[in-house]
Amino acid sequence: MAIRQVREIGDEILTKQCKAVPKMTLRTKVLIGDMLETMYEYHGVGLAAPQVGVLKQIVVIDVGEGPIVLINPEIIEISGEQTGEEGCLSVPGKWGIVTRPDYVKVRAYDQDMEPVELEGEGLLARAFCHEIDHLSGQLYVDKVEDGLHDVTYENEEEDEDETEE
Ligand code: ZN
């Protein structure tokens, strides 16, 4: 497995429609392994294939409950609503407020091309929506409600610096 370069906002590939995966191949298996490794390396909770420059309908997610691989995913049921912070490995150093359904049911294929249906609530529901949006060229930045904010890191030295503006 290898860590792949993450494409960033402004890269045209992030705006394109991805193609369905017709069957599992060695090449796609390697891609999925690389996507998982890349997601973990950059501490993301999800990654979509176009983010590593591949226009295929593949998503990997791990919200802390183990890896999920979704091939050709589609959302078949939603309910409720949640409003919260969202970020993206393709938009580094930023976050924004996005409203998503609080419950999402997804139909997809797993790594063995077996059909699966998965349900998610809370963060997992948000991750399903965010990653599946990537497959049709959509980024969360077009859905933020209060603009994009810079990620700030707590820094003790800065806190004690009274000359800070
Ligand atoms: Zn993203």
Image (tube, rainbow, N blue to C red):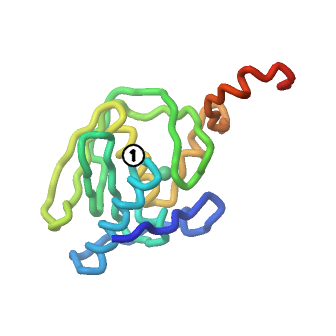
> Residue 35's x, y, as percent?
37, 63
Q: Is residue 142 left or right of residue 136?
A: right
Q: Is residue 112 above or below residue 61?
A: below
91 lies left or right of 1: right
Foreground residue among 129 and 96: 96
Label 1 CA crowd tier, 10 Å (few <14, some 14–19, many 20+) = many
The answer to which of 7 and 136 lies nearer the viewer is: 7
Q: Position of residue 127 (x, y in %)?
A: 38, 43
Residue tagged 1:
45
Disc 1 residue type (three-letter): Val
Above or below: residue 18 compared with residue 84: below
Percent of width and height locating residue 72: 29, 62
Q: Quadrant of the C terminus?
A: top right
Q: At which x and y percent is residue 50?
A: 46, 65
- Asked whether, in this view, residue 40 is left or right of residue 7, the answer is left
Q: How many marks?
A: 1
The picture quadrant where one finds residue 74 is bottom left
* Residue shown at 43% from the left, 55% from the top: 41
As helix, strand or loop, the secondary structure at mark 1 comes to loop
Q: Residue furthest bottom?
A: 26
Name the residue: 40% across, 27% down.
81
Q: Tell me: is circle 1 under 8 Å from ligand 1.
A: no
Question: At 62% across and 33% down in the image, what residue appears?
Answer: 153
**Image quadrant containing the N terminus:** bottom left
Q: Residue at x 47, y 53 (%)?
A: 42
**105 sits left or right of 87 in the view:** left
